[in-house]
Amino acid sequence: MTTKKHEILWITDPWETLDHRRDTTLRLMEEANSANVKQRWCSVRSIRLEGSKVVLDASQVMQINAERTSESFRLGSPRTLSPNDFTSIHYRTDPPIDLSYLHPLQLLQLGIQGSRSTELINPAPILFGMNEKFIASHLKNLMPASLASSQWEHLLKFGKKEGRTVLKPLHEAQSHGIHLLDWTTPLHVEQSRAKIEAISRGFTTPVLLQRYLEEILDGETRLWFVDGKLLATIKKLPIPGDFRVNMDQGSLLAPTTLTRKQSQSATQIGKLLKTQGIRLAAVDLIGNWITDFNLTSPGLITLMEKVLQANLARKIIQKLYP
């Protein structure tokens, strides 16, 4: 049981859109409820500016049953509150990182600006200023050959040099918009150009091209961190017959043991997270290469718990709210 007085606010996408059984945020709420931590929930859409004051509509979490269906949660009536009424706020709306994500976060940051008693997890400057697709550039020895650009001539040069590349939108998650591009023939170049033109909105928005890593056929390793310390690891297997990993489309999880190099990489990653003040993060490796960070709403906890037979949510809550 927690010994300090905390009041948590969980901000998520609208209630009816959540995958209640598998959602990591709701699993963390369940464990916080078991630890008797006072907490409220609100929809991201309720955050607003009234005159010069930022407010939101938050419901007290009264009860959570273990099934975690939509009906398993008993929430109080919404109250209009200030972000400063909470000691800890988790802004956990899911990507894409578009205006519907950024504008409420800007309002939230305005509401807690200058406060010494309210912590936003993860910090707003991190969520604003660090793109999950190329944070690995801070650890140059762990980032595969990559190019982020909106200029066709640079993308073409990189693609031809690599032969095959993975195309990634910079604002998406869960493998949305990811394509394997071939640059070895004129026809393939034209097909690659068409895909990039669509995703880059006519070459006006940067996209990421990254070296294709054959190790993906053996899976992708997820590293879950709390306060820079490695919490757990899991292997994510690609969709059958594909190179992409997507848990909603058939990818499976399997226990894994880190190699010596991966353990060293985990130490480097943990130091970066600690330096930046990033409290919760999930980082994906293919082989020993970092291919993705998740700082906005690091997830997969419920599925990892089933495979690893471990209460990871409890460990997270205990570390955040001792």
Image: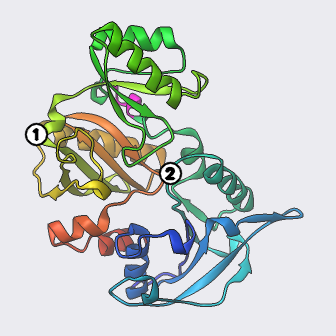
Q: Is residue 162 visible?
A: yes
Residue that numbered label 2 is attached to: 95
Name the kind of residue labelled 1 in the image: Arg
Q: Is residue 322 visible?
A: no
Q: Which residues are magenta?
A: 136-140
Compared with 14, 247 (above or below) is above
Mark 2 neighbour density, 10 Å: few (under 14) some (14–19) many (20 or more): some
Q: CA distance from mark 1 to mark 2?
A: 32 Å
- Name the residue furthest front: 187
Residue drawn 57% across and 21% down?
Answer: 203
Image position of 34 (left or right of 284): right
Location of the C terminus by quadrant is bottom left
Q: Is 292 or 71 nearer to us in this picture?
A: 71
Q: Nearer the viewer, mark 1 or mark 2?
A: 2
Residue drawn 48% across and 53% down?
Answer: 296
Name the kind of residue labelled 2 in the image: Pro
Where is residue 200 shown, x and y percent of the image?
54, 27
* Residue 300 position by quadrant: bottom left
Q: Is residue 67 magenta?
A: no
